[in-house]
Image (cartoon, rainbow, N blue to C red):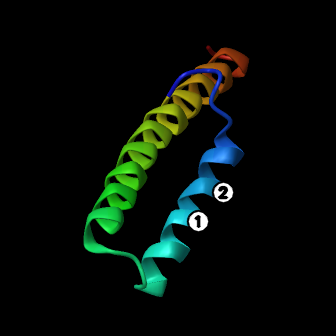
Amino acid sequence: MHESLDVQGVFLRLDEIAGLLEEGNLPLEESLKLFEEGNKLASELRITLDAAEQKLTVMQLEEEPNG
């Protein structure tokens, strides 16, 4: 995920997409587009969160007295 993308904004968009898909009132093609967008956003978000977790782990190791 690019730094310019807001994590909270991505969560909100994923929630919006889930709501639209759950309603079941969309044409199939539009549903597929939203599903693909949601998958892409979720994947990018997963990468961003994994990177943040790695940074936190490194920071914790650097703060340990024996580290």
Instruction: Give the image quarter of residue 43.
Output: top left
* 2 and 1 marks in contact (CB < 8 Å): yes
Tell me residue 63's x, y (percent).
Answer: 73, 19
Q: Tell me the residue that label 1 is attached to.
A: 15
61 over 52 or under it: above or below? above
Tell me residue 11's x, y (percent).
Answer: 62, 54
Q: Tell me the residue that label 2 is attached to.
A: 12
Tell me residue 2's x, y (percent).
Answer: 54, 22
Residue kind at label 2, given as amino acid type: Leu
CA distance separating discs 2 and 1: 5 Å
Instruction: Give the image quarter of residue 27.
Output: bottom left
28 over 57 or under it: above or below? below
Which secondary structure, mark 1? Answer: helix
For residue 24, side relative to residue 12 (left or right)? left
Residue ID at (27%, 64%)? 29
Residue ID at (58%, 20%)? 58
Residue ID at (43%, 75%)? 21
Out of 38 and 49, give the one closest to the viewer: 38
Out of 26 and 34, give the one closest to the viewer: 26
| Dot 2 alpha-carbon crowd within 10 angstroms: few under 14, some 14 to 19, many 20 or more | few
Residue kind at label 1, given as amino acid type: Asp
Residue ID at (59%, 30%)? 52
For residue 64, side relative to residue 23 (left or right)? right
9 over 38 or under it: above or below? above
Out of 35 and 1, give the one closest to the viewer: 35
Which secondary structure, mark 2? Answer: helix
For residue 27, side relative to residue 18 (left or right)? left
Q: Which mark is residue 61?
A: none
Out of 36 and 31, give the one closest to the viewer: 31
Quarter of the picture holding the C terminus: top right
